[in-house]
Image (cartoon, helix red, strand yellow):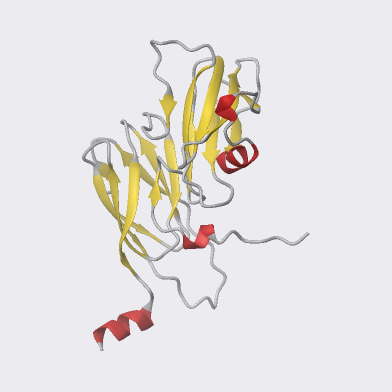
Amino acid sequence: MVATLDRNFFTQIGLDSGALTMLGVIVHTFGEASEYRGAVISGDGNEAIFYVSVDPGCAVAGVNIDLAALAGTAPGAAAGGQGPRYVVHPKGYAVFRVAGGPGGYAVSVRKAVEDPEVTAYDTRALQPGDIFSAILMRPGRYSVRNVLGDAKAEVTVSYPGDGKAAYKPPAPEAVELGETIEPAHIRLKPMQGMNFNVRTAARIVIELQEADDGPRAREAATD
């Protein structure tokens, strides 16, 4: 068996928590025991259905839900049929991630027996208590915005060293997102992630403002 690398991991620039790719992960806790019906929404509007049983009798503390696998194996599942089921404890969490491909997925989750007084959970509007984990692959300067509010920040990803010594990325930077983003100026080492602790309704958009292509590029720009 030959392992292959997905080029999307290295070529994607910027992130949007409302359109997940391989570079972003959302961690969500349901809290209330119930049966939930989820839909993976792709850019073309197709949906793939899955179910989550939040059961206090379950010892499972976390489930990984690969949106790419669901979208690939069950496109158009909203038209009918049963999707896969996951089971987790009410204090546990669901990890929404994209294991491969270009991504661009959102997730909407509501109770399986729909309650008109309960708003569906939607990753395009993160809730307090959610965590959005992000990695920026290209060195440079980025803007960070909560497009559902006014909070802004700036991220600088440093250019890698000479590679003569083994490199291990530092632990992810903890970022608080409420009315403001703290810290407002985030400095990351290559491959170092960020964990946004969400304290308010949020859709986090990260955009490249200025690339850093290394010392040679900087020298050429000054010639």
Q: Is residue 122 visible?
A: yes
Identity of the residue drawn at 24% across and 46% down: 152
Q: Camera-side residue: 116 or 220?
A: 116
Residue 155, percent across and down?
32, 56
Residue 104, percent across and down?
46, 45
Q: Is residue 178 left or right of residue 98?
A: left
User: Which residue reaches farthest left?
Assistant: 150
Vertical order, 109 against 5 (above or below) = above
Number of numbered discs: 0
Q: Is residue 187 left or right of residue 91?
A: left
Vertical order, 190 against 30 (above or below) = below
User: Which residue reaches farthest right?
Assistant: 1
**Rendering quarter of residue 78:** top right
Identity of the residue drawn at 59% across and 23% down: 52
Quadrant occupied by the C terminus: bottom left
Residue 56, percent across and down?
60, 15
Q: Is residue 185 visible?
A: no
Q: Camera-side residue: 43 or 126?
A: 43
Residue 109, percent across and down?
48, 25
Quadrant occupied by the N terminus: bottom right
Vertical order, 10 against 127 (above or below) = below
**Rendering quarter of residue 2:** bottom right
User: Which residue reaches farthest bottom?
Assistant: 223
